[in-house]
Amino acid sequence: MAQLYSRPALLLTGDREFKDSITKLLSTLQFRVDCASTSSEAYQLASSKEYLLIFASEEPSKTISAISFYKKLMTTNPEYKQKVLFFAELPNESLEKEFKYADCHYLNRPLEPASLAKEIEVMRENGIFNEARIGNRYNWTGECTISAEGTLCGKTMDISSKGIKMYYNGETVPANSEISISIPDIQYKGKAMVRWNFRMGEKNMMGLDLVEEINPLNLQKAIPFAYRAPDLA
């Protein structure tokens, strides 16, 4: 059931400080990160495991050439096309041309968390992910109350604009049930559909699709860098 908690990602960087910061950020975005410090190590991991996304840092020292790694990967693992996101210190005209020629996604360093959240959402909107949940997922724990047959109190495991996972004490709520839900920390009250529900240990876990989207400004009370669509910005 590991997929309930995180999504597999690969990070290629030789910069320890950057690795620590981006790994923490990706964890909040609900990615489980494998790290590689060399292109050959990253290539071996990408060839032996299935990742939802690969993040690669093009570094000034040139000890790692992320674009060369990408070109090699495309010759043997073309399924990763459009699933690699680069970080680079731009402007660098020649490097920027290489990214555009290879049709790659890239962001400037130093990295802004909101920029990463936005880019991942753009990739999602372009159909790169094969996920039922709409909107970026964020690891966040908040108190919530649901009303099905009685009132059940629990906590969120993750949250997106249109869905949550939560755990609680109480009886299992059947899939496809409509329930009421309240999350006071982000001032949300509404209806939700139960997508799945199962017991793990002493608690029940449940996936919910929200009937009404969480207000983006309220979502940012939980996750300050949470992505907001342009028409709501």
Image: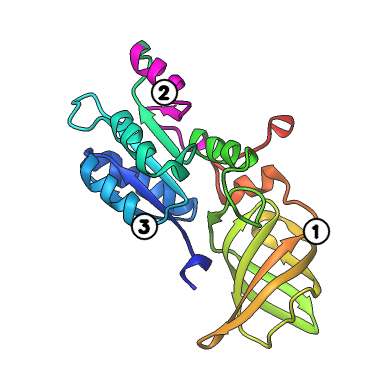
Left or right of 151? Residue 108 is left
| Vertical side of 226 occupied by 152: above or below | below
Q: Which residue is mark 3?
A: 49
Q: Quadrant of residue 49?
A: bottom left
Looking at the rendered structure, the secondary structure element under dot 3 is loop
Give the amino acid at mark 2: Phe
In magenta, the rendered stretch is 94-114
Give the amino acid at mark 3: Lys
Q: Which numbered dot is residue 99?
A: 2
Give the x, y percent position of residue 26. Answer: 43, 49
Asked if the magenta segment contains residue 226, the reply would be no
Q: Quadrant of residue 167?
A: bottom right
| Vertical side of 156 occupied by 79: above or below | above
Front: mark 1 or 3: 3
> In the image shown, does 214 or 5 lie closer to the viewer?
5
| Vertical side of 92 occupied by 227: above or below | below
Q: Which numbered dot is residue 229?
A: none
| Label 1, residues with CA under 10 Å away: few <14, some 14-19, many ≥20 | some
Which callout, 1 or 3, points at the residue further toward the start of the chain?
A: 3
Q: Which residue is mark 1?
A: 211
User: How many angstroms separate mark 2 from mark 3 (CA)?
Assistant: 24 Å
Q: Quadrant of the C terminus?
A: top right
- Direction top: furthest residue: 93
User: How many angstroms separate mark 1 from mark 3 (CA)?
Assistant: 35 Å
Asked if the magenta segment contains residue 98, the reply would be yes
Looking at the rendered structure, the secondary structure element under dot 2 is helix
Which callout, 2 or 1, points at the residue further toward the start of the chain?
A: 2
> In the image shown, does 114 or 60 lie closer to the viewer?
60
Give the x, y percent position of residue 45. Answer: 30, 52
| Label 2, residues with CA under 10 Å away: few <14, some 14-19, many ≥20 | some
Q: Residue at x 38, y 19 (%)?
A: 98
